Image: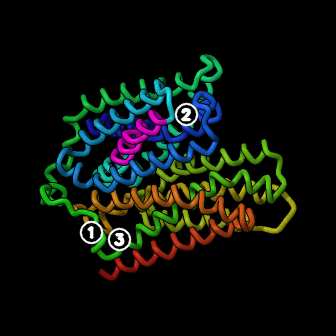
Amino acid sequence: MVSLLLAIIYLSFISLGLPDSLLGSAWPVMRLSFAAELSFAGVISTIITVGTIISSLLSDRLTRRFGAGLVTAVSVTMTAAALFGFSVSRSLALLCLWAVPYGLGAGAVDAALNNYVALHYSSRQMSWLHCFWGVGCSISPYIMSAALAHAGAWQHGYRTVSIMQIILSALLFLSLPLWHRGSADPAVAADKAQPLGVKGALRIPGVLFILLAFFGYCGAETTAGLWGSSYLVGVRSIAPQTAARFASLFYLGITFGRFLCGFVAEKLGDHTMIRIGCGGMALGVLLILLPVPADFFALSGLVIFGLGCAPVYPSIIHSTPDNFGRENSQAIIGIQMASAYTGSALMPPLFGLLAEYITLRLYPIVLGLLLLLIILMTERLNRLVKNS
């Protein structure tokens, strides 16, 4: 039963990743259906992000009242409905309307599942959980590509993913009896009627450190992925097709790196995995920065940066119950998700302004500064936990 539930949780994280890259894959064709500007995708993306932040902050209250299983099942159902709504929308206003449950569902799933796995499974399963998110992110562009090639309409791509989510929703509702594992844990069961809340979580020593680390990590990951190809072409004069291929390898590096980390994470521990990841990210930044004409260093640096990213996110999540207490983990992980989404939403456009008005050459410098923030905050937390 435990293995069956874990398989369902993995499927849920694939489903969490599936919608994340749909909009970017479909928008070049999708916008023509609405006579929309290219930049309007940013409006839809922002609505989704705001929804994920709100539901992440509410996840503690919702999960304590309804349980992780029901919150996940309902949230995936909301996402499925939103994706179907996208597929039948005939106006930009409807797209924006459906973006609301799209974001609310995604944020609640992310926070609830991360906390459940952090409480009940090892760091190996946590690393593989986030590997499966990468699998979902990688699959959806192929689904959209196939829909555009064979059916000629982006709507079929959204509808296909919606059907996949509906099937998963049914499985999640059927699996609800399996989610009571750990319900006897007094640390988890205690004080269910009294959610910690955002203010209560922020009063716990060290929480601010980990929120800043999460902001820095997700800002670095999304900035690296979004602007990597532009930097390679604009600064290093690398052919666009080569730059695009290595930008995709950055995400593959994160996904494959998390798969590999699963084999050693339990033995090395979360704090060591975070340090190893930061070391890999630092090596990647240095290779990108090297003032040499050979393309190899900058290209390999981007991929190594992705490999370095692999263990950081899941290891920070998995260490949360140990750092702050099992009874507080759901509230803190929810706030961590909100901080992560904020970093992902703010840093790429902020770097875009720096690139436009100053220079694109700041790309590795910005990545290095964000990495420095991660290192400083995680190390300060480590010292605080050791001394407490």
Q: Earlier in the sequence, mark 1 or mark 3?
A: 1
382 shown above or below 258: below
If the image is split into quadrants, where does the C terminus sit? bottom left
Q: Quadrant of residue 368?
A: bottom right
Q: How many labels does the image show?
A: 3
259 in magenta: no
108 in magenta: yes
Q: Considering depth in this image, is 299 or 197 the residue closer to the camera?
A: 197
If the image is split into quadrants, where does the N terminus sit? top left
Residue 370 percent coordinates (x, y): 57, 68
388 shown above or below 16: below
**Amino acid type, residue under disc 1 in the picture:** Lys
Q: Identify the residue at image location x=28%, y=57%.
A: 330
Q: Is mark 2 on a helix, strand or loop?
A: helix
Residue 349 percent coordinates (x, y): 60, 57
**Amino acid type, residue under disc 2 in the picture:** Ile
**Amino acid type, residue under disc 3 in the picture:** Val
Q: Which of marks 3 and 2 is nearer the N terminus?
A: 2
Residue 199 tag number: 1
Residue 129 percent coordinates (x, y): 42, 45
Q: Give the range drawn in magenta.
A: 93-109
Q: What's the CA distance linking mark 1 and mark 3?
A: 11 Å
300 shown above or below 92: below
Q: Mark 3 points at which residue?
A: 207
- Residue 287 is at least partly visible in this image: no
